[in-house]
Image (tube, rainbow, N blue to C red):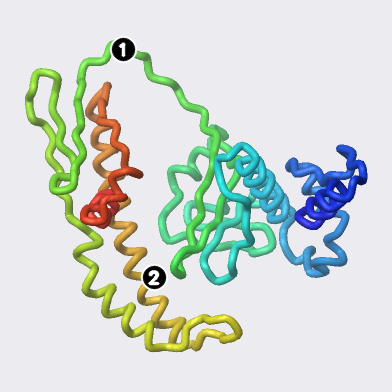
Amino acid sequence: MKDNWDENRAKKESGVEVVEDDWVDTGHFGLNNLWSEHRDELAPWWSENGASTYNDAAQRLSKAVANWRKGRAKFPTFKKRGQGGSVRFTNQAVRLSDSHHVRIARIGEVKTYESTRKLYRHFSRGTGKIVAATVSERAGKWQITFTVELTRQVPVTRAPERIIGVDVGVTTLYTGATPDGEHVLDVANPRHFVTAEKRLAHAQRIASRRQGPRPGVTPSERWKKANGRVQKIHTATRNARKNLIHETTTRLAKNYDVIAIEDLNVAGMVKNHSLAKHISDAA
């Protein structure tokens, strides 16, 4: 795609007329057709993977190019190997064998750590189906996320009765009050990152003394293990932060009908180097 663009730009600069058909189609189906045309010469191993793998890649690239053209993102770049990643499967490429096993195309049956009982019951009753599933890897942990369609009975709407206003902060993560001024919510900030800083610094010092990745140098196995310990601390911190946010937002959604939250310019606030770490730690 990039070669095609460079060639057409060179033609334009030299005065050669370039018509619309000369440009590579960057739509989802256009990129899929381009892949089908060149896959045998560029990737003779392509048949080892499921078809949805390449369909997902074409869809992501098409969206990335569209975002770049509209000024919403930078030009897409190649992703590096060994730094996590994800792939999205569609149609029948993923299905649940039972409440603890997932069958993935070309991989086979995989046991899940958490039970998928509630989801499996929907499929057994015929009240749900898998639209897509995303398999992702981060810090040595593998996760699968399902996009599903469920048949549900929508509850009857009623006038809002329980209203809360939420103020977010750094010292206290959330403070909530009702319209009449009654204080009903107070969640302290556990400062997950600050708590893990000493352990993280120790792990990073050890990793810095190992032979890490550099141009022309392959990282050593000891560096990979040391870096794995660093990523493990980062992951634990991130998961603890996410868990607290999920617990609090679930609590709000279950107990209140209308939730008002202040609108903060977080991107501007993190430019203050004295507060950036603590604001980011509060997510």
Residue at 80%, 57% in the rendered image: 3
Q: Position of residue 187 (x, y in %)?
A: 15, 43
Q: Position of residue 213 (x, y in %)?
A: 51, 81
Residue at 14%, 19% in the rendered image: 179
Left or right side of 168 for 57: right
Q: Position of residue 108 (x, y in %)?
A: 63, 63
Left or right side of 55 for 119: left
Amino acid type assigned to the residue bearing label 1 in the image: Arg
Left or right side of 89 for 213: left
Mark seen at residue 82:
none
Indicate the secondary structure of the residue bearing disc 1.
loop
Within-10-Å neighbours for mark 2: few <14, some 14–19, many 20+: some
Mark seen at residue 231:
2
| Name of the residue lying farthest toward the left | 182
Indicate the secondary structure of the residue bearing disc 2.
helix
Mark 2 vs mark 1, CA separation in Å = 47 Å
